[in-house]
Image: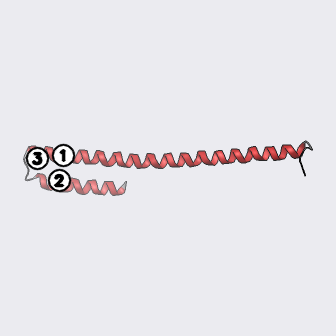
Amino acid sequence: MKKISTALAIALGVVSLAACKQSPQEQTADNIEANAENTADTIEQNADTLSENIQANAENVADEVRAQGENAADQVRNGADADGNSAQ
């Protein structure tokens, strides 16, 4: 996020300096491009965050499935021993 903020500040500074010698149409066009670039950067950052969240959630679900499987297996093992029917 800091990298984006720094890049945005630099870009705005460059645009401001360049704007002194530009026509109003060119300034408007540059602003449109800058806004589109900022929007695209935000979309990419949101996609990265979403991907990280999806991966973390998938890992959590996988861990839960493993834990449930282990618990179910333990219950079967313990139940077989408790009723005296376990093969030895």
Check disc 3 and report the residue beneath it. Answer: 26
Q: Residues within 10 Å of mark 3 (few under 14, many from 20)?
A: few
Q: In terms of sequence position, does the residue under pointer 1 or pointer 2 come before the other?
A: 2
Q: Residue at x 50, y 45 (%)?
A: 54
Q: Residue at x 34, y 57 (%)?
A: 3
Residue 4, percent from left and from top: 32, 54
Q: Secondary structure at mark 1?
A: helix
Q: In terms of sequence position, does the residue under pointer 2 or pointer 3 come before the other?
A: 2
Eye-nearest disc, 2 or 3: 3
Whole-number angstrom distance, CA of label 1 to CA of label 2: 8 Å
Residue type at the position of mark 1: Asn
Q: Residues within 10 Å of mark 2 (few under 14, many from 20)?
A: some
Q: In the rendered structure, are the residues bearing label 1 and label 2 in contact, judged by CB atoms less than 8 Å apart? A: yes
Q: In the rendered structure, are the residues bearing label 2 and label 3 in contact, judged by CB atoms less than 8 Å apart? A: no
How many labels were placed on the picture? 3
Quarter of the image with the N terminus is: bottom left
Name the quadrant containing residue 18.
bottom left
Check disc 1 and report the residue beneath it. Answer: 31
Name the quadrant containing residue 28.
top left
Residue 31, percent from left and from top: 18, 46
Residue type at the position of mark 2: Val
Q: Residue at x 65, y 45 (%)?
A: 65
Q: Secondary structure at mark 2?
A: helix
Residue type at the position of mark 3: Glu
Q: Residue at x 79, y 44 (%)?
A: 75
Q: Which mark is residue 79?
A: none
Residue 51, percent from left and from top: 45, 48
Residue 9, percent from left and from top: 26, 55
Check disc 2 and report the residue beneath it. Answer: 15
